[in-house]
Image: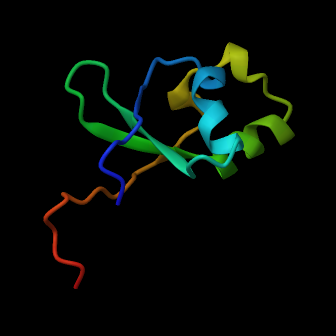
Amino acid sequence: MSPQVIAAKENTNAEQISAGPLAEEFNGVPVIDDDSGAVIETGTALDILRAIQGGKKLNTMLARDIMTPNTSVLKKDTPVE
């Protein structure tokens, strides 16, 4: 687990968040609610590549448009078992 997590608000331009996963710096970005800061989705390199392969232009989309919904999130002190 990385202590420094890069997250994106749901209204962040999708092109802005694609650099890290596509450069293989990390595999995914938690997408957080603009108001509460709670994690609502996760965007992965695969999600970004699917959007590009589907002919979508990342600079015209928001993070929430291409991210994986219903993400499971654990707190840092959750036991592995």
The way the protein has been coloured in the rendering is rainbow
Label total for image = 0
Q: Residue at x 66, y 22 (%)?
A: 15
- Residue 47 location (% of width, % of height): 65, 46
Say which quadrant the N terminus sits in.
bottom left
Q: Quadrant of residue 18?
A: top right
- Residue 64 location (% of width, % of height): 50, 30
Q: Residue at x 22, y 85 (%)?
A: 81
In this orientation, which residue lies closer to the viewer: 21 or 62? 21
62 left or right of 79?
A: right
- Residue 66 location (% of width, % of height): 61, 36
53 left or right of 6?
A: right
- Residue 78 location (% of width, % of height): 16, 68
68 left or right of 78?
A: right
Most distant residue in the top direction: 60
9 left or right of 61?
A: left
Q: Residue at x 79, y 28 (%)?
A: 56
In this orientation, which residue lies closer to the viewer: 63 or 19? 19
Q: Is residue 58 above or below residue 1?
A: above
Most distant residue in the left direction: 77
Q: Is residue 16 above or below residue 46?
A: above
